[in-house]
Amino acid sequence: MATASSDGKGAMTRLIGWVAQSWMFIAFFIGFFLFWEFSIGFFNVPLYILTPPSMIVTKAWADLPRLFAYTYVTGLETILGYMVAIVIALPLGLAIAFSSILRRTIYPFFVTIEMVPKIAFAPIFISWLGFGLLPKVIIVFLVCFFPIVLNAILAFNSLSEELQRFSRSTGAGVWRTFVKIRLPAALPQCFVGFKYAGLNATVGAAIAEFIGSDQGLGFYIQITTGNMRPELAFAGIFFLTAIGLVLFGIITLAERILIPWHISVRRIQA
Amino acid sequence: MQGLIEFKSVTKTYGAGSSAVHAFGPVSLDIAEGEFISFLGPSGCGKSTLMLMIAGLLEASAGTIRLAGKEVHAPQTDIGIMFQDNTLVPWRTVRGNIELQLEMRGIPVEQHAEHISSLLQSVHLADFADRYPFELSGGMQQRAAFCQAMVHRPKIVLLDEPLGKLDAMTREHIRADLQKLWMQTRSTVIFVTHSIEEAVQLSTKVAVITPRPGKVETVIDIDLPFPRDLKVKGSSAFIRHVREIQEIFHGYGVI
């Protein structure tokens, strides 16, 4: 494995290396915000349509307590829905992969449901279950569940023939084969599902809040836009993005810990 | 004399009815203990299938296979197998992969630490025990896979084109190591290959298998001294054996 030095000097070298490699991107990024900042005045864009980034920062600063409180609400919906999706989808995917009956019943059903835009269920759930936490968790769950379960089925079904034969030739039982071979071999494909679901989790939470809620970042974005306060809506979007980034960061970290040997992780570390 | 491995009219067909494909057979063959026998034939002749049947990993369509007198109907565990694509797992080091064979069998790994080290030494991998498969060249991976197949000291070793994907020089080098190891253990080896020279160099016997549907055309005794180094390979007896087999395949239009 790559022996990444963790001392301060190594980190500094890596930072310099990153800047040297990505300076064009950094320059573009800064340039984008500068253009945004100064074009508002230049083109006389009314402030109720769009505000410069500097104003977003100052106004958001003043409204920070509310933003934090709502980030907590939306974050909780996102994480709960995502966790429940993993806890249910992973064992279910495993069961479908190994049961010919489930593969002929639930599996085609799931593939069909996957075609339905899950978000379209949001108004129904909210009318059934009210404005609280539960309908949002269910929407996030629905958005995350299918990519995780479908990738898990694929993962547990695609052990190479040679490794299957190797396992049989050792006389190892089902459990030992699972722990030592099937599970580690399936993890990379499972993470494809985890990542895809993670990217969509905040989308589910925000849209569910648009449809019916009295708190959360989706609610905040909708209300502030309605009040002609685009700078606060942008702040809400920023915090929503932060939730997504934290979730994705956790998934990537778990991937590095669980499958450091896999090519997708090795490329990042190289 | 009864062989350690006996094939009796073994055939394999895939599918059924009018669309059935007759893959090979009937094959009848006796393999004695301590033999190094090559299954030599063109691709698709069923030599790998034949090998997997000894291990009980594939069932014959008709006929019987006996291992030490017992009919084979389930996976055999006292065999060492090296598959065409190696079974090194990417999440374990070379040593970890060799240990996997023991762990799967419930054999305590600690008691075999020295044995693993000596195996690695014999295939020149001692310095790479803690490397991961992706850090190794193709040849080194095959050497590691060989240790994985041998670590539980099997009496019968099945090697399915272990050198098939390697370059000529690496092949030559690993062949020599393989021969040295076999001379020490004298286990019964079934070696699947489509290289005539490789078969003649390594084997005590070469089973020449015809194109599909595969049949054992003949079993040739290779009565040359071991180790079969460069000198033996240059001898007229060696070249005669190679010629003889080439002519058989030429007759079938394979070469």
Image (cartoon, coloured by chain):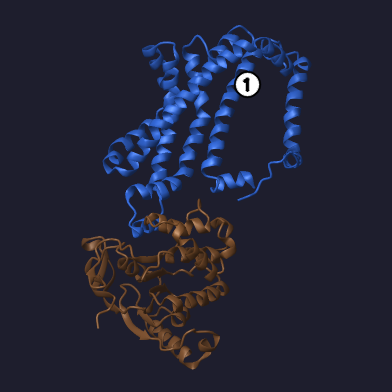
Chain colours: A blue, B brown
The chain holding disc 1 is A
Q: Position of residue A209 (x, y in %)?
A: 49, 15
Outermost residue, bottom side:
B236
Circle 1: residue type: Phe
State the residue at coordinates (48%, 57%). B97
Q: Between B187 and A229, which is closer to the camera in this rendering? A: B187
Q: Position of residue A132 (x, y in %)?
A: 44, 12
Q: Quadrant of residue A108?
A: top left
Q: Is residue A75 above or below residue A29?
A: above
Q: Tag 1: Cα neighbours inside 10 Å, few (<14), some, or many (≥20)?
A: some
Q: Is residue A143 left or right of residue A244?
A: left
Q: Between A267 and A127, which is closer to the camera in this rendering? A: A267
Residue under pointer 1: A238
Q: Secondary structure at mark 1?
A: helix
State the residue at coordinates (29%, 42%). A99
Q: Quadrant of residue B150?
A: bottom left
State the residue at coordinates (38%, 41%). A153
> Number of labelled discs?
1
Q: Is residue B82 above or below residue A43?
A: below
